Image (cartoon, rainbow, N blue to C red):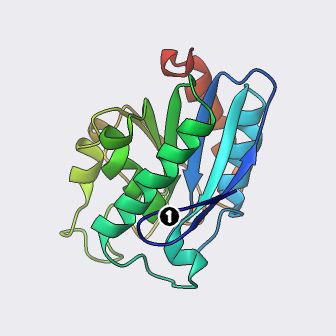
Amino acid sequence: MEIVTPHGPARAEIDPVPDPRFLLVLTHGSAGGVDAPDLLAVRDAVLGIGGLVARVTQPFRLRGARAPGSAVKQDEAWAAAVAELRRSHPGLPMVQGGRSNGARVACRTAGAVGAEAVVALAFPLHPPGRPERSRAQELRAAGVDVLAVSGDRDPFGMPEAEDVARLVVLPGEGHDLKKDPARVGEAVAGWLDAGARTRR
């Protein structure tokens, strides 16, 4: 499904389920795609609990860029894509999330798009080796419950437990969360399945 945004087309790959409980909208990191192992594992696990999943490739990646550019433009494009997906699937509670840069977008836009919660995979708390440049405020400003799933070997750091509703730290995992992606999917699906935020 191609979606028109103010900053170029986005593309959504939608995995439906019969009588969905909620809509989960996921996106990629700066240089990756929606077929990243952790995103696919989350998709599979969430389909198993009755969530309809849309994986969105943002306009900058469709243009072939490896960096998102302006955060304002990225967030505007994201909001437009989510709005179209919500119009296509009315009446469903919506959770949004992503990995790395995509997790930042999900946190920054949660309030504007009416998300019930945010799933932040490998949230890049700071640039590698630069802990003084913390992005924790993006987590705190989400305005909704945030699940953060991070590896304990991530050079981008990990969120603090007090800055999110739930923090899951996976031993031995780096920023790509690809050592055992199924653990990522289980963590996300378990949290969403238990939450009233995914009830119609």
Relative to residue 57, is residue 26 depicted above or below?
above
Residue at figure coordinates x 73%, y 53% from the top left: 40
Is 35 placed above or below 169 here? below
Q: Is 39 left, or right, of 126 in this rendering?
A: right
Q: Quadrant of the N terminus?
A: bottom right
The residue under label 1 is which amino acid type? Arg
Q: Closest to the observer: 12 or 87? A: 87
Task: Give the percent coordinates (x, y) of residue 177.
Answer: 61, 59
Q: Position of residue 75 (x, y in %)?
A: 36, 59
Residue 5 is at least partly visible in this image: yes
Q: Residue 155, image x and y in percent?
A: 43, 70
Percent across and percent down for residue 140 are 24, 43
**Residue occupying image coordinates x 41% and y 50%:** 106
Count the marks: 1
Asked whether the viewer can see residue 157, the reply is no
| 183 or 109: nearer the viewer | 109
Q: Which residue is mark 1?
A: 153
Mark 1 Cα-neighbour bin, 10 Å: few <14, some 14–19, many ≥20: some
Q: Can you tell which quarter of the image residue 49 is in?
A: top right
Nearest the viewer among 83 and 143 is 83
Name the residue rendered at 31%, 38% in the picture.
111
